Amino acid sequence: MSWLTPDLIDILLGILKAVVILLVVVTCGAFMSFGERRLLGLFQNRYGPNRVGWGGSLQLVADMIKMFFKEDWVPRFSDRVIFTLAPVIAFTSLLLAFAIVPVSPTWVVADLNIGILFFLMMAGLAVYAVLFAGWSSNNKYSLLGAMRASAQTLSYEVFLRAFPDGRGWRRPVHST
């Protein structure tokens, strides 16, 4: 009896596809950030993003090093668990929303029959991240701002969910 069953192979291939797609997206994000920093350095006549290293490539490395060594600072009166959970929820909902987007006819992480509904549900989870971020700061103004941002997000999502197939609430026309 082999431990490499067909179900395990499918699971491992799904994980491998997800990791490859994630690496491609992160690499594209790094190049987009490099291009943005280079153009901003050119427009603002700054040395870092434009002239340091080979074509300004060391600026991206310096930004990564700076980001890795930043302090994880939590405000004194805030709820630490919810404060750290809010970005995790936002990032997870974003990754899960793009798990159903096909890269090619054979490369898709999750082939779901309810793909558009899953995408909308994962986009709706980001509202909780905003609410948790406002609530965890233990400040009434932050909570009001988070509630306002969540209300704005939910107000457009109502119409986004009402018209996923282009027909909306119209009654079907039956020809006789």
Image (cartoon, rainbow, N blue to C red):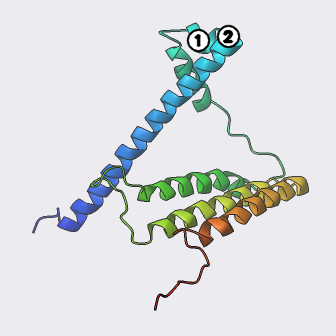
Observer-nearest residue: 75 or 167? 167
Q: Which residue is mark 1?
A: 50
The structure residue drawn at horizontal position 61% and vertical position 19%, both measured from the top left corner, is 39
**Residue type, mark 1 in image:** Asn
Observer-nearest residue: 7 or 169? 169
Q: Is residue 136 left or right of residue 45?
A: right
Q: Where's residue 117, x and y in %?
A: 51, 69
Q: Badge 2 local density, few (<14 within 10 Å), some, or many (20+)?
A: few
**Image quadrant where residue 169 sits:** bottom right
The structure residue drawn at horizontal position 42% and vertical position 45%, both measured from the top left corner, is 22
CB within 8 Å, label 1 to label 2: yes
Q: Badge 1 local density, few (<14 within 10 Å), some, or many (20+)?
A: many
What distance separates the C-alpha of mark 1 from that of mark 2? 7 Å
**Image quadrant where residue 34 sits:** top right
Outermost residue to the bottom:
176
Eyeballing the image, is 124 above or below 62? below
Q: Which residue is mark 2?
A: 46
Outermost residue to the right:
140
**Residue type, mark 2 in image:** Arg
Q: Where's residue 100, x and y in %?
A: 42, 59
Observer-nearest residue: 35 or 129? 35
Observer-nearest residue: 10 or 66? 10
Tag 1, which secondary structure? helix
